[in-house]
Image (tube, rainbow, N blue to C red):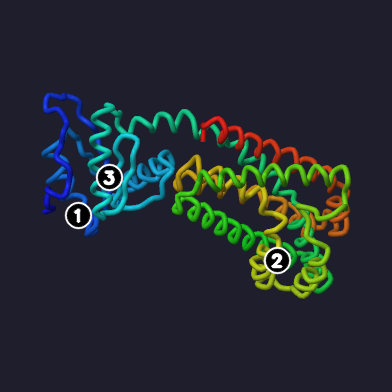
Amino acid sequence: MLSSHLYATPDINSNNTYEVELLFFYETGCPHCARINDFLNNRIKPNYPVAIKEYEIHNPDNAYLLNLLAIIYNSKVNVPMVFVGDNFIYGDKRISLRKIEEAVRKALRTQAPSPLSRLAEYKGGLQQHLTLPAVIGTAVVDAVNPCACAVLTILLTSILLASKKRNRVIGAGFAFTTSTFISYLLMGFGLFRAIQFAGVQRIVYTIVAILAILIGLWNIKDYFWYGRWFSTIEVPKSWRPKLQRITSSITSVPGAFSVGFLISLFLLPCTSGPYVVIIAMLSKSTTQMHAIPLLLLYNLIFVLPFIIITLIVGLGFTSTERVDEFRLARLEKLHLATGLLMFALGTTMITLVLTGKI
């Protein structure tokens, strides 16, 4: 039990009929949570008109609710965690206990609504800022990225020259595609969790919005003045010989699977722009539970050209040379499409920040 003399004497009018709602998220067996529970039951409940709602986070619904509230309150996810009025408090240090009591007193003075009332604001506002068309549109632009398609073409060419077996080409293409899908999905999910658990969604969101605008303008530059300076969605020329040496030495299906992970790291500078923008948007506007299917969809679209190239080359409908010619002939238009989309996304994100909607 906690000593009550450490805290201010309640000055709330006993005739006040308003009851504040407090949400308490805890984990069974957590000693810090037990300390907060004692404080709520021995200090807050006897002295203030408060309704305490408890949520054990091992329950999936409760974990989902905690993630949702963390997004709305722009906080990191932690336990023990208390939401009351406009405030969130985590931890069990003495300063945290004082903050809980102060938040309760403030909520009573202002007759603050339940934190759960802010869920309607989230559903009606934030989720609309990240639409399914935005995810799909960005993934489509990223999917026809010349970096990844070029590497796959080189890989398939080397396997055709080495074995002449179409089934090996198909196997290697799908192995490369699978490893690229896995690596990008894991990197995306890891970045999403890092942003959310660090509690810096708004900061990252703003930085990425500015980055999206810059990437967009640079790609539009490549449409009008292609070849000048550095290109944002192509492998730097100095890297190309090394990439060609790596891929040309691979002639087996296991080798193609292994090289997919390695190449994914090489390709990050020229393929990560649209992906990072979408991850930043997801981290600010959705929960982990909702982000996973969207990341899966994004990466499925991203690797779809790999599947198509693998099949049309492996089944003999075309050659790798024609695939590469097709890619090169449309580079400038691809830069323009990427530039316009990234600029539009970045501008929308900045507008939401400046108008206080994010």
Q: For label 1, count other residues whose C-alpha is less than 10 Å away and answer few (under 14), some (14-19) or many (20+).
A: some
Residue shown at the point (58%, 37%) measured from the top left:
132
Depth-wise, is mark 1 or mark 3 nearer the camera?
3
Q: The residue tagged with tag 2: helix, strand or loop?
A: helix
Q: Amino acid at mark 2?
A: Ala
Earlier along the polypeptide chain: callout 3 or callout 2? 3
Query: How far separated are the C-alphas under marks 1 and 2?
Result: 57 Å
Residue type (three-letter) at the residue carrying disc 1: Arg
In front of the other: 77 or 11 = 11
Q: Quadrant of residue 336?
A: top right
**Picture layout, residue 43 above or below residue 29:** above
Quadrant into which the N terminus falls? bottom left
Residue 177 located left or right of residue 113: right
Nearest the eye: 354 or 120: 354
Residue 35 is labelled as 1
Mark 3 Cα-neighbour bin, 10 Å: few <14, some 14–19, many ≥20: some
Q: Count every numbered label the image shows and give the total.
A: 3
Q: Secondary structure at mark 3?
A: helix
Q: Position of residue 192 (x, y in %)?
A: 52, 52
Q: Residues within 10 Å of mark 2 (few under 14, many from 20)?
A: many
Residue positioned 66% across, 47% down in the render: 211
| CA separation in Å, label 1 and label 3 | 15 Å
Numbered label attached to residue 99: 3
Q: Report the mark closest to the observer, 3 or 2.
A: 3
Element on which disc 1 rests: helix
Q: Say which of marks 1 and 2 sits in front.
A: 1
Which is more N-terminal, label 2 or label 1? 1
Q: How far from the left and from the top, in percent, is residue 328?
A: 86, 52
Q: Label 3 is placed on what type of residue?
A: Lys
Q: Where does label 2 land, which residue?
A: 172
Identify the residue at image location x=47%, y=43%: 290
Precedes in sequence: disc 1 or disc 3: 1
